[in-house]
Amino acid sequence: MAETKIPALTEKIFLDNYAPTFAVIDMNYRLVYVRGRTGKYLEIASGQPSLSILEMAREGLRAELASAIYQATSEKKNIIRERVRVKYNDGFQAVNITVAPLTEPGIPPGCLMIVFQELELTAGATKANPPVRGRKRLTELEAELNLTRENLQAMVEELEATNEELKSANEELQSNNEELQSSNEELDSSREELQSLNEELTTLNAELHDKNELVSKTNDDLNNFVNRTDIAIILLDDGLKIRSCTPATSDIFNIRKIDSGRPIDEITSRLVYDKMVDDAHEVIRTLQPKEVEVQRKDGYWFNMRISPYRTAQNVINGLVVSFLDINEQKKATALLRETTDYLDNLFNYASAPITVWNSDLKITRFNNAFAQLTGRNSDEMLGKTVDILIPPDKRANALKEINRTTVEGQRWEAVEIPIHHADGSIRTVLWNSATIFDTNGKTPIATIAQGQDITDRKKIEQLKDEFIGMVSHELRTPLTVITGAIQTALDKRISREDLRELLTEALSSSEALAAILDNLLELSRHQAGRLTIDKKLTNLSEIVRNTVDKIHRQNPERKAIVDISNKIPPLLVDPVRLERIIYNLVENAFKYSAEGTEVRVFTRQEKGDLVVGVSDHGGGLSTQEQKKLFGPFERLGISNKKGIGLGLMVCKCLVEAHGGRIWVESKRGEGSTFLFTIPQNKPARA
């Protein structure tokens, strides 16, 4: 049993007493293992302890050790530094350094083994020797040159050549003092060059220090920007692995600091959008940035932008993925869209015609009411100048008003400008306008105008004036007859027969006057909503015959035939209003038919209703005239006939108040027949 432990024990004795001292460091130059006595090479500095081998290296070792570590890491091979002078106990110890990368399986990447092989102390190496101060200075300069030999290799080679020359000069010193003097001069010259190089090195160190400070400041600025920004930014490498990200990224991804180096598709996302990885591959393939509006699962909106990551050398080395908060913008856009739709609907479906034209007087927009006003569609108006809608004879004055609002920026207040309808008619329109200015608030760029079609109102006003004139005339005529008859009747010399004739004439005129007044009153009641029907059982035949007799007294030369059966059962109607309907229809028939022709009043049954008709042999009516027949003040262009044009309109109101309907059947040149129904099974309505 004891013999089996001999190899292990002897191996331990060998490693403890005869093996060289070595240390193992990780990729961050931190000690992970030490074997042997390292106190001659490494020491813990005062202050907070550190495991960095470079911070623990003794004077004279740090520069060579850093250079060897860097070279071994970059070249992936063993690096040896011989006879490195390390200060120890007020003297210097010579040591060989070997730096070897550890690539065996199971060892973390980037680890290095550093082996220290101690050499014997050289003569005079333990204590500083004042007589050889110059040589010591030369050695120190050589050590400093070794620290910068990678940048000043050419100078080192020159120095080595000079050293060779110095050696040669020393060997020849015994034989030739003059050659020794010459060598000394060359040495002095080399010393001056070294001093100059040292000054240059000092300058380079100062510049490097300034650049390091600038890099540090830039790094601080960048860190503050990254930590304070509200924009989520992720930096990815070519394999879509995470390099770094801003704190705001955690609002979109379940990402932590330890996730650096993980593929982005392994990170849980809070986005509804699931094609970010596909978009990233596309950007790497095309090198074209891509923007997509994406939504978080809670409804929050971001603008995702994926761009290539470009280095200072313009090399693509990954991607930059940023998420800009556009939630308020999306809300504002939705509100703007809603407001725009609301205003568009207000504009398009407003009852008043509205149009917009620009500074060139070209129409840019209009609503449905304006299209109806003009009778034109968008193809006929958009891009056309507004003057195409104005009658030629009114165009000059209208353009003055248009220029006043479009060029001078003045508002319209109830400006009357006619519109030429596509069917050739002229519409009278009152316009109000507002000028739209550009951003400076001074230059007019467009005009919006709203109109009110007053064509019908103007026509009604004109008809009203004509109506007043007609009423005055129609009322004055029977009054004149009545007044004249009464004045004549008061003459005592007049005979009894003449008196009777005068009174008959006065009665006829008073009945005509009463008919006019009755029509005016009925129309007034209808328009005021106070028309009421007093229903009673009424004999239709009796009402018709009495009414015809009354009209016959006013027109004794005319003949009317009543073709109505006495067997018609009594009707539930307003007898006064029924008489007025018959009176107006028969009077119109007499008025618009030639003398010597007869007027016929008849009845017939039609779908459960009783139809009453009044036919004449007048000139007849065209289709257009029939459409306007039951309107107010319509006299069909016949100005030589008495009347004020309200009879048929009153008939329509009264028939409809009974629940019936009224219409006309006529052809030009063949006379007319006016018909109305009296519902026999329906109650009359107010």
Image: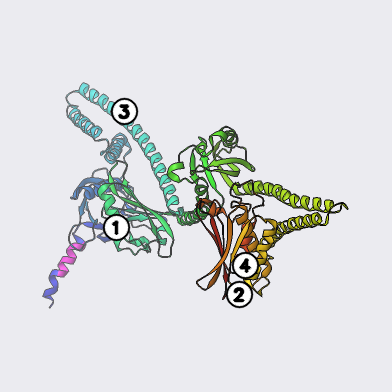
Q: What is the distance, in whole Å, between disc 2 and disc 1 at their CAs?
A: 80 Å
Ranked by sequence position, the earlier of labels 3 and 1 is: 3
Seen in the picture, residue 444 relative to 220 is either above or below; the reply is above
In what element is the residue under mark 4?
A: helix
Disc 1 designates what residue? 277
Q: Is residue 151 magenta?
A: no
Q: Nearer the viewer, mark 3 or mark 1?
A: 1
Quarter holding residue 601: bottom right
Q: Nearer the viewer, mark 3 or mark 2?
A: 2
- Give residue 192's mark: 3
Quarter holding residue 685: bottom right
Answer left or right for 468 relative to 150: right
Please provide the residue range marked out in magenta. 8-16
Answer left or right for 438 relative to 491: left
Disc 2 designates what residue? 683
In what element is the residue under mark 3?
A: helix
Amino acid type at mark 1: Val
Front-most of residues 609 and 377: 609
Please report the residue visible at 60 percent of the width from the left and 76 percent of the height from the top. Answer: 569
The residue furthest bottom is 1
Q: What is the distance, in whole Å, between disc 3 and disc 4 at their CAs?
A: 131 Å
Disc 4 designates what residue? 657
Amino acid type at mark 4: Ala
| Crowd around label 1: few <14 · some 14–19 · many ≥20 (10 Å) | few
Q: What is the distance, in whole Å, between disc 3 and disc 2 at their CAs?
A: 136 Å
| Image location (x, y in percent) of residue 250 | 40, 61
In what element is the residue under mark 2?
A: loop
**Residue 578 shows up from this direction:** no
Front-most of residues 6 and 493: 493
